[in-house]
Amino acid sequence: MTPDALDWVKRYRRFMTNERRLSKHTDTNYARDLAALISFCNANGIEDWTSLDPQHLRLFAARAHARGLAPRSIRRRLSAVRSFYQFLLHERAVRSNPAFDIHAPKAPRMLPNTVDADQMARLLEIAAEGALAARDLALMELLYSSGLRLAELAGLNWEHLNLRDRTVRVLGKGRKERVVPVGREAVRALTAWQASLVSRGLRAAQALTAQSPVFIARSGKRLSHRSIQARVAYWGRRQGLGVRVHPHLFRHSFASHLLESSGELRGVQELLGHANIATTQIYTHLDFQHLARIYDATHPRARRKP
């Protein structure tokens, strides 16, 4: 592709970072997806963005599928291309969006993994002896209590938490903010984590300022995504759960348990920060027996006559 065409990609990424304020993770994914498109264009003699048409993109998606790329990844690639062309349209660099009506192969619907309430209780039955255990218990309690995403948890500062009101202010996908309740056990664990920081002296106490990260490593720096993943996996093995424990498992279990107890799909959608209720509806498939019991107990034609 020509240098001018490649420059549009740089301008698009600057726009997405500065104006849309997308996360570093999303930016990295978009950069990878657009790099794949550039390679495809170079291999097919396409020199500028006005020359790319829907047939090219169908071939782009088909080749990715033939190489074994998952339908979800192909969908993300096409979404990145669609977004890029919307930017080009806005800048009047092209006249149409060739990705507008291109669809990825359908992916099989995968139900999220969860653990039941008893398993979750066993996982969280750890003695918070020492700063490391206190921190890990606090972050796991908060993950399960409030259904946070990994990035949301890692990005928390103390100013986002109100332990008195038992709420946490979360910056979710698309920089959308929501306020989520924090359970009593999570408040207790977070308070213990605060106390452990204070007891370690001035350097640690400085980590309790409003703008300081809630969860820090031994170095005092913000705990990374990878470190959080490693710690929850460690506790899953140590507590003998028998399943792979990862941060999103807490979020899935939070949603499943809350929906099973309340039946409030819209409420769970708000707590999870889902833009589309269809994303939340996947949790209604996790416990059909529970739903069947509700049906048998409440539907006029299902209730047994005395």
Image: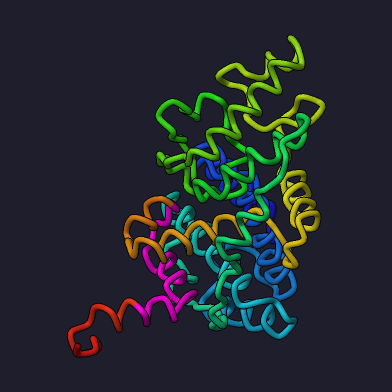
**Magenta segment:** 272-293
Q: Main secondary structure of the magenta part?
A: helix
Q: How is the image coloured?
A: rainbow
Residue at the (80%, 54%) spot, across then down = 238
Residue at the (69%, 16%) spot, across then down = 198
Where does the image place residue 23, in percent across and percent down from the top left?
59, 44
In the displayed image of the protein, which residue is found farthest to the front? 306
Q: Quadrant of the N terminus?
A: bottom right
Q: How many marks?
A: 0
Residue at the (61%, 77%) spot, across then down = 71
Where does the image place residue 205, in percent across and percent down from the top left?
68, 14
Drawn side of residue 57 relative to residue 95, left or right: right
Q: Quadrant of the C terminus?
A: bottom left
Q: Is residue 287 magenta?
A: yes
In the image, residue 213 sits, relative to residue 204, either above or below, namely below
- In front here: 194 or 35? 194
In the image, residue 34 sits, relative to residue 212, either above or below, namely below
Drawn side of residue 192 relative to residue 226, left or right: left
Where does the image place residue 125, in percent across and percent down from the top left?
67, 48
Drawn side of residue 146 relative to residue 14, left or right: left
- In front here: 297 or 103? 297
Where does the image place residue 168, in percent across and percent down from the top left?
47, 35
Q: Is residue 245 magenta?
A: no
Drawn side of residue 167 relative to residue 48, left or right: left
